[in-house]
Image (spheres, rainbow, N blue to C red):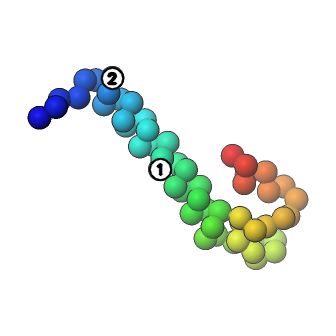
Amino acid sequence: MHVLTKTELLASILAMIVLEVYHLKWIWLSEWGCRKCQRKNLDCACDGRWLKYF
């Protein structure tokens, strides 16, 4: 059985955190609706939708 070093463990934890942030962003874009036009955030063209590009 391979034992991870502290560096490998830290890198894998950070990678999982980044992956989860992108997953939550995808859920927000594809499932939640815009308050102004009621379209999904991914399809919304309202002004101020700069959060889409984060």
The x and y percentages for residue 48 are 84, 55
Which percent across, then down, holds residue 4? Answer: 23, 29
Q: Reply above or below: 19 against 37.
A: above
Residue at figure coordinates x 52%, y 48% from the top left? 21
Disc number for residue 7: 2
Q: Give amino acid for label 1.
A: Glu
Residue at figure coordinates x 69%, y 46% from the top left = 54
The one nearer the camera, 2 or 9, is 2
- Amino acid at the residue labelled 2: Thr
- SS class, disc 1: helix
Instruction: Report the residue marked by disc 1.
Output: 20
Quarter occupied by residue 9: top left
Depth check: 8 or 31 in front? 8
Asked if 52 appears above or below 8 in the picture, the reply is: below
In the rendered structure, which disc, 1 or 2, sits on the residue that comes first in sequence?
A: 2
For the residues marked 1 and 2, what is the alpha-carbon distance in whole angstroms? 20 Å
Q: Which mark is residue 33?
A: none
Q: Residues within 10 Å of mark 2 (few under 14, many from 20)?
A: few
In the image, residue 14 lies at what x, y percent?
43, 35
| Disc 1 and disc 2 in contact, CB within 8 angstroms | no
| In this picture, residue 46 sits left or right of residue 10 | right
Residue farthest left in this picture? 1
Helix, strand or loop for disc 2: helix
